[in-house]
Amino acid sequence: MAVNSRISGLKDRSVAERRALVADGAGVDAAALTALDAGGLTVEQADHMIENVVGTIAIPLGVATNMTVNGRDYLVPMATEEASVVAAASNAARIARVHGGFHASGTGPVMIAQIQLLGAVDPHGARARVLEARQEVLDLANAQDPVLTRLGGGARELTARVLETRDGTQVIVHLHVDVRDAMGANAVNTMAEAVAPVLAERAGARSLLRILSNKADTRLVRARAVFDAELLGGPRVVDDIVSASAFAEADPYRAATHNKGIMNGISAVVLATGNDTRAVEAGCHSHAARDGRYTALSRFEKDRDGNLTGTLEVPMPVGLVGGATRAHPAAQTAIRILGVTSATELAEVIVSVGLAQNLAACRALAAEGIQHGHMRLHARTVAASAGASPEEVRDVAERLVKDGRIQVEYAREVLESLRSGDR
């Protein structure tokens, strides 16, 4: 069944109505979404995932609409506590749909395991001897995971470099592993442990660290989209977004906030699907500093038709097998809603959402200031913080927005007035 991500007015529906619409749009049984109740995880299930469990913490899970990636529609689960994120991504995706949505591609699911070798008398000679053992090392690595190799993955390449450190000269070996539909940490760490003794013997050295790198620059994913100038607000808005993008490219203080906007979208989907947010964030931010200076991860330019083009390229080490993706019922449901069938497809959707989120933030900054839209959506959270019941939240939030005073203290005044019948 083809997914239609264009669901108009979803925000105006009740939670039950939204679930029914999302289930219908994604082609899944509505009963499957009950796994999202109360965070989708019991204390008993949590006790099998980490240590010293005393409870769970729930994060709101919304669904971004309008997303088209490589010609296919997706309803995208996003887990975040920040108001405006889901709405902003959905709106940016709507603007991108006019020109075909998002187009994404990548380099393949290759991760790097690092083996640190210490004490080689002749480090350059040690490097050469290590590389001479390439096939032996690759065969030994692949013997650790016959299932992965049977699925078409496995160790693919061996590289080595001599690294000068404050603790002396070290030889650093990289084992490149195609991890297929896994995030890959367990697979590459197991392989690194197995080959370390052989590498140490060949190098005449001692192995110390044997672990994957979260600088996953052999697992890059890129997304691009054209955003219609008129839907953005006109030529002036396009020019101002280009100028804002140039600011972020040149200044690390602005780049940090610019990239945080990207990660608002990326991390929300990564979390919703049970993937490792810390690994993804570390990889993205290290990629932003790959040339020795921290800069913007995305680029915005004006095309010959006057529309805005956006591009984003980041490492995206996510998977569909293993970890919380398999152990967490809500993550499993999120994957079902999304309908992806490979880690590569998941990564392409995630990076597209990151670009959508970034565009939405830049447009808000350039057109009206970030607080205008954000605070309108934040008003509901403020109303709830002031003690409004679910039935009262909407009325209190509307009053806060109308009066332009989105503050907890004022919300308490409005709530008291509402309950006393004094409007």
Image: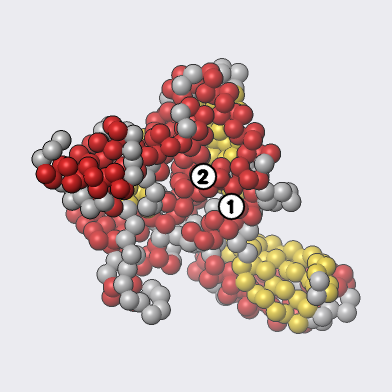
Residue 337 visible within the image:
no
Give the percent coordinates (x, y) of residue 38.
25, 61
Q: Secondary structure at mark 1?
A: helix
Pointer 2 residue: 262
Is residue 205 found left or right of 47 in the rendered image? right
Judging depth in this view, the residue of 149 and 371 nearest the camera is 371
* Quadrant location of the C terminus in the rendered image: top left
Pointer 1 residue: 284
Instruction: Tell me the crowding category of disc 2: few under 14, some 14 to 19, or many 20 or more residues within 10 angstroms, Cα based.
Output: many
Is residue 302 found left or right of 422 in the rendered image? right
The residue lying at 56 percent from left, 42 percent from top is 258
Give the percent coordinates (x, y) of residue 193.
63, 78
Q: Are marks 2 and 1 in contact (CB under 8 Å)?
A: yes
Using the rendered view, name the quadrant where residue 248 is placed.
top right
Looking at the image, residue 220 lies above or below residue 311: below
Is residue 301 found left or right of 413 in the rendered image? right
Number of labelled discs?
2
Looking at the image, residue 305 lies above or below residue 182: above
Amino acid under label 2?
Ile
The residue lying at 27 percent from left, 69 percent from top is 42
Amino acid under label 1?
Cys
Q: Earlier in the sequence, mark 2 or mark 1?
A: 2
Judging depth in this view, the residue of 16 and 151 nearest the camera is 16
Q: Secondary structure at mark 2?
A: helix
Looking at the image, residue 338 lies above or below residue 69: below
* Quadrant location of the N terminus in the rendered image: top left
Give the percent coordinates (x, y) of residue 325.
40, 62
The residue lying at 38 percent from left, 73 percent from top is 49
Measured Cα–Cα span from mark 2 to mark 1 = 10 Å
